[in-house]
Structure formats: structure tokens, C-alpha cells
Amino acid sequence: MTHRLLHGKRGIIFGALDEHSLAWRAALKIKEEGGTFVLTNTPVALRLGTVHQLAETCQAQVISADATIVEDLENLFDQAQDILGGKVDFILHSIGMSPNVRKQRSYGDLNYEWFLKAMDISALSFHKILQTAEKKDAMNEWGSIVALSYIAAQRTFPDYSDMAQAKAMLESIARSYGYRFAKSKKVRVNTISQSPTPTTAGNGVRGFEKFYTYAQHMSPLGNASAEDCANYIVLMFSDLSRMVTMQNLMHDGGFSSTGITEEILGIL
Ligand code: NAI
């Protein structure tokens, strides 16, 4: 059922790689709700992934950009405004990658160049996007910007490794830039802390399946799916959430407030 919550709104969606991506589901839902947007990803993701299929379905244009390169972002914001016919109302940052996690390096044996790369891709890219949007004056008033995070920012999950630091930084950037953007343009900036979800990035974490099952048993409502996440993103881009900013919003079926469940006790 569609409510046309995003009718007339324009935006940029980062991070759709294939049909499992959280950004992919979000794009379909945003389209359904009347939003128009451009899709963007790195040149290699555009080559290896299936973004062009999504673009066809959503009648969206695809712009290549590496979110760690400011010149790419400047070009992206210029092109996006030309294509969409004006400033943007929403931005989704759905970007994450850690070479240390991918290559299963132990937390006591991290490669620091890779660590910095993980921070640049997964956290600093958010600041670069926000700063470019502000400098280009590319956001409409009462616009909404969302990045996707994970509860490892607050609690330790050993195999999440340096991505935990990246997510902590991502959430901190949302607060700091959220203050600035609220004052200057009434733009809100939030992170959504999503349940484990089977995607390319999710499956890259060692033991993901057990991780997913554990969270499922620990969440009174069960894990939030990619579809649920897409719905929450739509809500955050709609005018129904216009006074919510600088928040890390738990979207996890109750996981973050739960100490133990009957299901877990039953297994022990
Ligand atoms: P995904 O692998 O489908 O998406 C990650 C995206 O980041 C890919 O499209 C990739 O091309 C893009 N990316 C990597 N380097 C980039 C760069 N330099 N510039 C621009 N884009 C770049 O996986 P998923 O799960 O959809 O990840 C999206 C976001 O959701 C990530 O921030 C992830 O940490 C977060 N998240 C995922 C959870 C999960 O269990 N899957 C749980 C909580 C948060």
C-alpha cells in the first residue's frame, strides 16, 4: 500500500549494489512513495553489481562516484541537481566496507592502512557528503539525511572489528553535522541502527548466519528486515518526522533494550 509520503521529493541514494542491498529496497520503496532520485555507487560497483537494473525499474539515472573523493561528490551534486531539476530533499548514505573485516584480520593484528580505509569509506564519507551538500547549497529546507549504522557502535561484537569504530564515528558525525545543518537549513541528519540483514556487507562479517540467528532470538519482534528498513527510511524522509534530528534510531525489533529472552534461555 502506498501513501505517497514522498510525493514531489527529490534525492540521492548511495550504496545500492544488488537486490540484497538495504539501499536497493529503500530505492524501490521511495519510488513507490512518489520520490524521485539518482542512484550512485563506485565505478567498480557499477560494473560488478546490478544497479542499472534497479535504475531501469525506478526510472532513475546512475552517477558514478567514489564517496571518499570530494571531487566525485561535487560532480555528483551538480549532476544530480541538473537531472532532478533542483535542490534535493533527501540523501541516503548506505555505504560500508572494512578490508580488515573482509580479510578476517584479528582485532589484535589490524592493518592500519586498511583501518583508515574502513574509516574513510564507512564514516568520513558521510562528512564529505554532508559538507559537499552544504557548500553546494544543494539541500532544500526541511530536507532529511540518513546513514545506516549498527549497534556495534555501542556494544562489542568481536567479529565486527574496526567497523565498530567506523559506526561510532558515523553516528557522531550525524550529531555534529545535524546541529550545523539544522541551524543553517532546517535539514535533519540521523542514523538508523539496523538489525543484521543478509546482504553483501552483512555476509562479509565472519559467522554472520549465527549472528543473525542470535539477534533473531534476542529481539522480541524478531530482526528488522530490509523491507522494514526501507519503510523506516521512507518515514525519515517524509514530513512526518520533521522534528527528529541528531539521533541514532534503533531499528532492531527491540534487540537493544533486551537483556535475555526465553528463546535464548531455551537454547542454553
Ligand atoms: P551492501 O554491500 O549491499 O552495501 C554497501 C555499499 O557500499 C555497496 O553498494 C558498495 O559498493 C558501497 N561502497 C563501498 N565503498 C564505497 C565508496 N568508496 N563510495 C561509495 N560507495 C561505496 O551491504 P548493506 O548491508 O546494504 O550495507 C549498507 C549499509 O548498511 C552499510 O553502512 C552497512 O554497514 C549498514 N548496515 C548493514 C547491516 C547488515 O547486517 N547488512 C546492519 C546494519 C547496518
Image: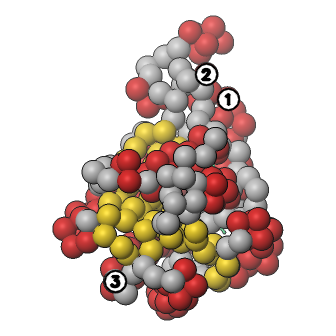
Q: CA distance from mark 2 to mark 3?
A: 45 Å
Name the kind of residue labelled 3 in the image: Asp
Q: Toward the viewer: 45 or 14?
A: 14
Name the kind of residue labelled 1 in the image: Thr
Q: Residue at x 37, y 65 (%)?
A: 143
Tell me if mark 2 has few (under 14), some (14-19) or many (20+) residues whose alpha carbon lies within 10 angstroms of its own: some
Q: Quadrant of residue 142?
A: bottom left
Say which label, 2 or 3, has the lower sequence index.
3
- Which element is circle 2 on? helix
Q: Residue at x 66, y 12 (%)?
A: 267
Say which label, 3 or 1, has the lower sequence index.
3
Instruction: Report which residue position mark 3 lands on.
Output: 137
Determine contact: label 1, label 2, CB under 8 Å.
yes
Q: Residue at x 79, y 78 (%)?
A: 47
- Which element is circle 3 on? loop
Ligand 1 occupies quarter: bottom right
Task: Indicate which disc residue 213 carries.
Answer: 1
Q: Residue at x 59, y 15 (%)?
A: 264
Name the kind of residue labelled 2 in the image: His
**Which quarter of the rendered picture does the N terminus lie within?**
top right
Residue 76: x and y in percent read 54, 85
- Which element is circle 1 on? helix
Instruction: Report which residue position mark 2 lands on.
Output: 217
